Image (cartoon, helix red, strand yellow):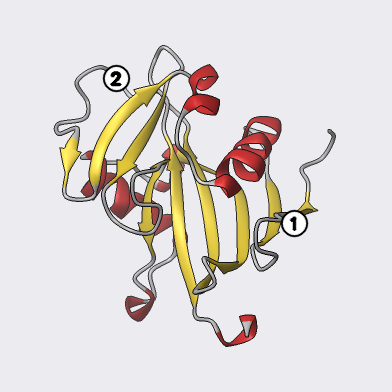
Amino acid sequence: MADALPYKIAVLCYLFDERGRVLLLHRRKPPNRDLYSPVGGKLEQGAGESPTACAIRELREEVGLEVTPADLHLTGIVSEAGFDGRMHWLMFLYELNRPVGDGAIAAMEFDEGRLEWHAPEDLPGLAIPATDRDVIWPLFWRYRGRFFMAHIDCTGGDELRWRLEQPAGGA
């Protein structure tokens, strides 16, 4: 029963370099093991961590970047109901509002996986989660620099249902 599933809260952080390539994590651990996703992680709910503080912490831990709230733009909020039949997700999507310079990332490999730079046009050929490929990335590109909110219903088996709940002003 979907309403009995636990809710997880996480952030995803979209980083680009000076050439416009996006930084993705080739994941070694669940969720989305062996798939590519932006860096990020779960909020420390027990500590009352805010989504912005989580994004700052994850960027420090996974990428080695020190950023401030002013360096981040909240691009979107995405909820996913019934992910893998095991949980619901509430995800805050942040974009670093400045490019990451060459050599700014100290280690491209760590326990979570391997960081890789990819050109945006290469994303369709990468192994990425269906929800990212079909919903989140298209909305990110469409509303980049603005804001959107979407809900994805993963309870329909292979059928992905979703709706845009809060589009940014304009198309």
Q: Residue 15's x, y, as percent?
A: 41, 32
Label 1 to label 2, Cα distance in Å?
38 Å
Mark 1 sits on what residue? Answer: 161
> Quick one: SS at disc 2?
loop
Is 7 or 158 nearer to us in this picture?
158
Rendered residue at 39%/58% (across/down): 31
Question: What residue is drawn where x is 19% and y is 20%?
Answer: 103
Q: Residues within 10 Å of mark 1 (few under 14, many from 20)?
A: some
The residue at which mark 2 appears reads as 101
Q: Nearer the viewer, residue 7 or 35?
A: 35
45 vs 134, left or right, is left
Quarter of the image for residue 63 reads top left
> Residue 11: image x %, image y %?
45, 55
- Above or below 20: residue 143: below
Looking at marks 1 and 2 on the same chain, the residue that comes earlier in the sequence is marked by 2
Residue 157 appears at what percent x and percent y?
65, 63
> Residue at the right extreme?
170
The three-letter code of the residue at mark 2 reads Gly
As drawn, 128 above or below 41: above
The three-letter amino acid code for the residue at tag 1 is Arg
